[in-house]
Amino acid sequence: MSDKTISRVLENTLAGLSEIRESFIPTLQLEEAGWVESVGNGIAHVKGLPGTGFEELLKFPDDLYGIAFNLEEEEIGVVLLGDYWHLRTGDPVERTGRVVEAPVGESLLGRVIDPLGNPLDDKGPVHYSKTKPIEETAPSIMDRAPVNFPLQTGIKVVDAIVPIGRGQRELILGDRQTGKTAIAIDAILNQKDQQVLCIYCSIGQRASSVAKVNADLLSRGAMDYTVMVVSEGNAPAGLNYIAPYAATAMAEYFMHQGRDVLIVYDDLTQHARSYRELSLLLRRPPGREAFPGDIFYLHSRLLERATHLSDELGGGSLTALPIVETEAQNISAYIPTNLISITDGQIYLSPTQFELGILPAIDIGKSVSRVGDKAQLPIYQTATAGLKLNHSQFVELENFARFGTRLDSRTQKVLDHGQRIREVLKQSNLAPIPVTEQILTLLALKQGLLDAIPLEQIAAAERTLATTAGQLTKSELEAIRGDQVPDDRLIAPLIQHCEAALAEFKP
């Protein structure tokens, strides 16, 4: 290229640039500038940013985010969602124009993540293409369908006496170390091959407890259909606060696809305490037990999102098993009573039964399902008829018999039968029992076939019945799993199987 050509190109370029510069009209754009006024324990007070909306996400230095919680005239109270130790007074704050969102999608299955989607396992980064706001309005009444399909937990006493349906909210409550988490984990394990996805949300639990749950789920292949959302005990209160909402958003994604989901909140006592901590730090007025006035709304807007959607919306369901810890068996405390009034029933675990080795330590008298047999396989109505009444009579007579009173034969018979009921309802941890085995055992119990068997041989008799359950014919299996109450013609062969299996145990 000649010098003359190069000179001409440069002249044309300079002329073009000059023309662009002369035609450019700068526009003024206002930007809100915010700064940190003060930093507390998991919260910050921010000035500036007058256009900030309620619960808007604010960005701090080093990719730290916070939720605008208190919108006051002079400043904003912000709940911080991460490590805030590096934050200093005067640090800049930016608006994001969006609310907190959680990652959703199939890629989360099998992963252990925090409420913001950061991985807590050693499987590398979490890949997802969609996010969903953690707060969402619960489905309206017209968008819901009745709860009429069972969610089998594999726990005999629950499936027989306190049945749980898909779309139900069943509270698990009891003192610490009584087996609350164990019941929820058994329910998750029993969903294998049941087409139910599971989400385990750990709120403020010890890292060792979370690691044990993860090991139990991994060793039994349950992580293939489970997501663990974990906010550890040393996490900021803000992460504990958003954890159950983020987990519910992940569950709702699957529910709106027409799938069935089980979510466990472990536990909402820690969630309420974290919210109380944040509220007191932000100078919100305290109420009963120093909890803020909207503590009921905290959990009601969460648990109302659990439902069974109508067929027009895909027919998916979200079943919630919230866990709450009581102190000294006081189920009338503030948070437990709030949750009892929100949920559709409760499973109460008794420390007395736990100490006696009656596991699971479920107090049948204080446990209830407000959905009842509407969410139970019809054959259970036949197999468990009178079971709860017989158990309550046994407990009352057992207390009376401790005084050493002479008992007539009828009373002794009630006591003997009640002892068999208690022995049958015992169950090992991490060993959910299929429906067929449960039904044969319950039928044998109802027919009095176990009354003549010594107590120490009841467990062996149950194992024999379990073997028999694996040999049932197709028609017998259909009678057990059918959606109609079976008549005597269908029940009779099952009873005959029980009699044949237990013949060797009769004295």
Image (cartoon, rainbow, N blue to C red):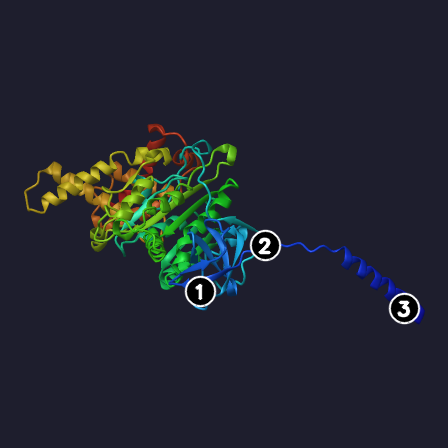
- Check contact, mark 1 vs mark 2: CB within 8 A: no
- Residue 112: x and y in percent read 46, 58
| 5 and 322: which is toward the camera | 5
Q: In this view, does 443 lie above or below 106?
A: above
Quickly name the residue at label 2: 30
**Which of the image's four quarters has the C terminus?**
top left
- Crowding at mark 3 (Cα within 10 Å: few <14, some 14-19, many 20+): few
User: Label 3 amino acid?
Assistant: Ser
- Crowding at mark 2 (Cα within 10 Å: few <14, some 14-19, many 20+): few
- Crowding at mark 1 (Cα within 10 Å: few <14, some 14-19, many 20+): some
At horizontal 33% and vertical 32% (from top left) the residue drawn is 492
Q: Which disc, if any, is residue 483?
A: none
Camera-nearest label, 3 or 1: 3
Quickly name the residue at label 1: 83
Give the mark, 3 or 2, whose residue is nearer the N terminus: 3
Q: Can residue 490 be seen in this view?
A: yes
Give the mark, 3 or 1, whose residue is nearer the N terminus: 3
